[in-house]
Amino acid sequence: MNINSRTNSASLAFGDLNTQIRSPRSITQVKIDSGAISNVDDCGMNNVDSDSTTSRADKIIIVSNMLPLHAQKDGETESWSFSYDEDSLLWQLKDGLSPETVVFYVGSLNANIDAKEHEEIAKKLLDDFNCVPTFLTDDLIEKYYHGFCKHHLWPIFHYMLPVCESHSVRHDQLLWQAYISANKIFADKVLEVANLEEDFIWIHDYHLMAVPVFLRKTNYKANLGFFLHSPFPASDIYRTLPVSENILRSLLNCDIIGFHTFDYARHFLSCCSRMFGLGHEFKRGHIVLDYCGRTVCIKILAVGIHVGKIQNVLNLPSTSMKVKEIKEKYSGKKLILGVDDMDLFKGISLKLLAFEQLLEKYERLRNVLVLIQIINPARSSGRDIQEVKRDTYETANRINQNYGSPGHEPVILIDRLVGLCEKSAYYAASECCIVNAVRDGMNLVPYEYTVCRQGSAIIDEAMGMKSESPRTSVLLVSEFIGCSPSLSGAIRINPWNIDSVEDAMHSAILMNDSWRQMRHEKNYQYVRSHDVTYWARNFVQSMKRACNHDGQWCWGMGLGFSFKVVALSEGFRKLFAQSIIPAYNRTNRRAIFLDFDGTLVPHSSTEKNPSYEVISALNTLCNDPKNTVFIVSGRGRSSLNEWLAPCEGLGLAAEHGYFIRWTKTSDWESSLAVDLEWKRVVEHIMKMYTEATDGSSLETKESALVWHHQDADPHFGTWQANELLDHLKHVIVKEPAVVRRGKDIVEVKPQGVSKGLVTEKVISKMVASGETPDFILCIGDDRSDEDMYESILKIVSSAIVPAVPEIFFCTIGQKPSKAGYFLDDTSEVQELLQWLAELSPGFH
């Protein structure tokens, strides 16, 4: 199968562009052809075809740690046989996709297969099952899965920090390297069956969080989706992982990232904000991140169960026989059921303590209640698992000794692998089900219990119920698991609060049938409508919408896990010397507009005086009679006057154009005559927010007020800024002022004042004096500079300007913009000005 891949080597890092911009005589030509960037080795730009097919093949590659297969070896012939694991969520999700969809699986086998058989079995699995196996060595599995996944990622994602070496594993770089190696193998296997620009790659869970960066490096327009089945921890927990930045960068290479709950998504977004300064937006019900021009969608979608499969199991004779057996064995008893993995986070011991307290408090319930705890086999090994198991058995034995009687044990531990038929029988026969995990990703036990309590004709007969009898169930669900927000009919509990769990158990046992029926119906309606097919169909549809790369140009930047793809609109390109110099030479009246902060001087610079080279280039450009040069800034006029004092012929626009000075010898003039009485009230309000927000500051200008929060806590500062914005909108609603939200600022300024007003005034004056510009250069770095681009386009397309000039709009940094060109930083702006100055008659 054809694999469409493009690699990005270290030598082609995007940063190499800086070496190409030093001299206007040695710039490599960048050819623009049909909206695509040609493959230029010197510039490190990876070619991305713009004419890629618009009709994608309906093909999905599911990538997970384990394949949805059972493997069995014949003892006599030593041959392997394989079958689909119908209990696997990844196998069941196929029912949510259209019949025409071709699904491939990439993952490992739960079997130890000799290396000599790898090729033969890989071919068999691909031909017969559409599965591509990743054959990892035993050593790699131990380090990657049991080591890094289970002893590093799993605890931290469940809020367990390695503060005590006796109960946790400290970060091990060798295990991290094994994780990377394993993920690279998975990515390589994906490439064996995937056309990355046409097929959709759906990666699952924390085992494979490094796969996206490998696939994105291979093809910048790969269609990548990721779904996390575990919790995502709060940012202060996640950041304790030494490789947290690497993992987060890898995930951001996806087009869509899915989580079970809003809490998990919120924590992920918090990490993006705190670690990389990324903001997010809500657009028509969707959460989106802008990451280097690429839109990363955040999907909140709780997984479900395969309701039809559970119902089929209920109709099996073996299930009904088991139900009868349970009903007879526990006749006259009320059953409380727990189904959990033997795991540190499942809260089994806390559940038993609450049950013990219930029996101690209510003597009449001691011979009535039975807690049946089914314990699934542990998925990992270690000292913590042994401690949990020992604690569980000790507590259960103590309860049975203190509150049991001949022929009656209040606690029944079933510590073995329990099949779905037997488990479904216990679900159907139990009055109440409790899931008491202290932290869990989703946990589908409550869903399975709800469907089993709905029953079937065969189960009704085994239970001795009439078919028209109302269906009842009571769920006790920990508030710290993923399914808790979905089940509105459940009783939510805090597993750490033993008293409240005991009260909830007591309420569940004594609840009347009408309440049981109401709670059951609410839960069942949700579980039935939000099953695994709904989850799969919804996520795949969202992935197809998110993976729309049409109309984008893509560049690769960075090495290793710092790699990212910058996506920009077609036509957006680097401003090279050969693009602008010919136009500059052949024109006679030029207008040049430059922003100050972030354009001539870096934002991070504490010294705002422009360099000698910038001052020299500005003076040379201003002395050229063909040029009109303006600095258009949000800064106050006193600051600009001080910093740019050596430039005699330079025009200045301060406070976004409220004040304008045409040359150093001319007077400052106000562009608008407006009432500024509103400043007094606005300043008072902004001071209140400054006092309440540590790290914020208030900047007072002659015409405007700006509240800055770049040094405040990212989340608190953003919340306060949004609240301030809403507050001020109501205050100035009848005033001649506007309030706007910028990057880390809230600004209030007079109506009508913008940088675009400056460009309109300057160009209009040039036209009125018979010096209509035939060349316009405008360079800026933020949203306020976009106003200049808009105004220039508006005025040059009007009847005022007889002929459209040659226009060069340039932004600083590679980001979405109305500009057609970009430069990487202020040093490249300086070089551009020097190029142009060298062409002026006054250059020495």
Image: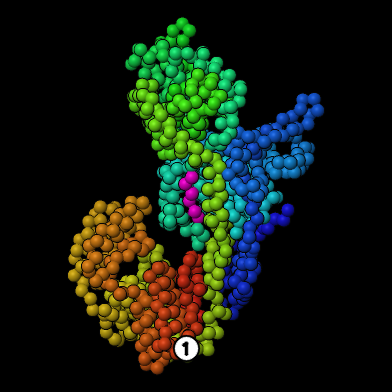
Residue at the image point whose x is 52% and y is 87% from the top:
585
Which residue bears the numbered disc 1? 803
Residue stretch in magenta: 296-301
Q: Is residue 768 magenta?
A: no
- Secondary structure under tag 1 reads loop
The answer to whether 805 is drawn above or below residue 344 in the figure is below
Count the labels in the image.
1
Q: Is residue 742 left or right of residue 190?
A: left
Residue at the image point whose x is 50% and y is 68% from the top:
824
* Residue 351 place in picture, x, y as percent: 42, 24
Residue at the image point whose x is 44% and y is 83% from the top:
797
Residue at the image point whose x is 48% and y is 49% from the top:
299
Q: Is residue 386 left or right of residue 756?
A: right
Prevailing secondary structure of the magenta residues: strand
The residue closer to the viewer here, 65 or 563, is 65
Badge 1 density bin: few <14, some 14–19, many ≥20, Cα 10 Å: few
Judge whether residue 596 can be spotted in this image. Answer: yes
* Residue 14 place in picture, x, y as percent: 57, 64
Q: Is residue 113 left or right of residue 154?
A: right
Q: Amino acid at mark 1?
A: Ala
* Residue 474 place in picture, x, y as percent: 42, 27
Q: Is residue 37 left or right of residue 745?
A: right
The answer to whether 324 is drawn above or below residue 15 in the figure is above
Where residue 356 sits, quadrant-wise, is top left
